[in-house]
Image (cartoon, helix red, strand yellow):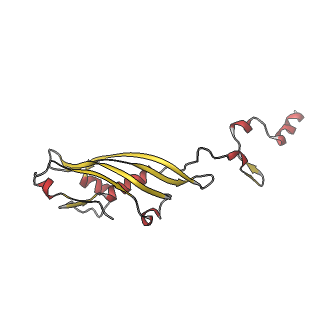
Amino acid sequence: MKMNFELLRLKNDLDKNIPIDMTYSFPREMLDMTDLLELNNVKIIGDLHKNALDDIILNVEVSGIMILPSAITLKPVNYPFNINIDGNIEELMEEIDENSKKVENTIDILPIIWENILMEIPMRVVESDADISTLKGDGWRVITENTKNEGNSGLAKLKDLL
């Protein structure tokens, strides 16, 4: 799906701005190459307008909730985000290298929105109620603030030698 907007009326000074107020759910195909599990009901509010230099400016606020896997348990974690995008449409398109084409009579802002959302994905998220104290394996265990002061029994024997 695209987010196409007709720019002819704006370029010919028939309209002062083009309002943008939409909710978008990203399809599974777009999420496949990312860590995102879901990205639904993303709210996009703002406008397209022309500045004093006759450049088309995109000014939008993008907000929603990303659903990402927990770095510890892989359970889905809600991660709220809020992005402000404000810039010359041609420069924004060049930044994401969207075929470096000149903006003519219509513009699809979806690639700009998508690229900015991708930059907001955190390296890792952990669910707030994850019980990591029970995580352990063969020769290892998770050390928390509570267990850090318990000491290492193997090193305690060396201390007795001194």
Give the residue at x 48% y 60%: 34
* Residue that extends furthest to the top in the rendered view of this protein: 162
Q: Is residue 58 visible?
A: no
Side of 6 where 3 appears, left or right: right
Give the residue at x 13% y 56%: 9
Q: Is residue 64 visible?
A: yes
Q: How many marks?
A: 0
Q: Position of residue 66 (x, y in %)?
A: 47, 52
Side of 96 where 126 appears, left or right: right
Give the residue at x 17% y 45%: 51
Seen in the picture, residue 149 relative to 42 is either above or below; the reply is: above
Give the residue at x 37% y 56%: 115
Tell me which corner region of the image, top left, top right, bottom left or bottom right, holds residue 75. Answer: bottom right
Instruction: Compare residues 40 and 70 and report the one nearer the observer.
Output: 40
Looking at the figure, which quarter contains the C terminus?
A: top right
Instruction: Compare residues 70 and 154 and report the one nearer the observer.
Output: 70
Instruction: Compare residues 70 and 138 and report the one nearer the observer.
Output: 70
* Residue that extends furthest to the right in the rendered view of this protein: 161
Q: Position of residue 98 (x, y in %)?
A: 31, 61
Tell me which corner region of the image, top left, top right, bottom left or bottom right, holds residue 1. Answer: bottom left
Q: Position of residue 131 (x, y in %)?
A: 67, 46
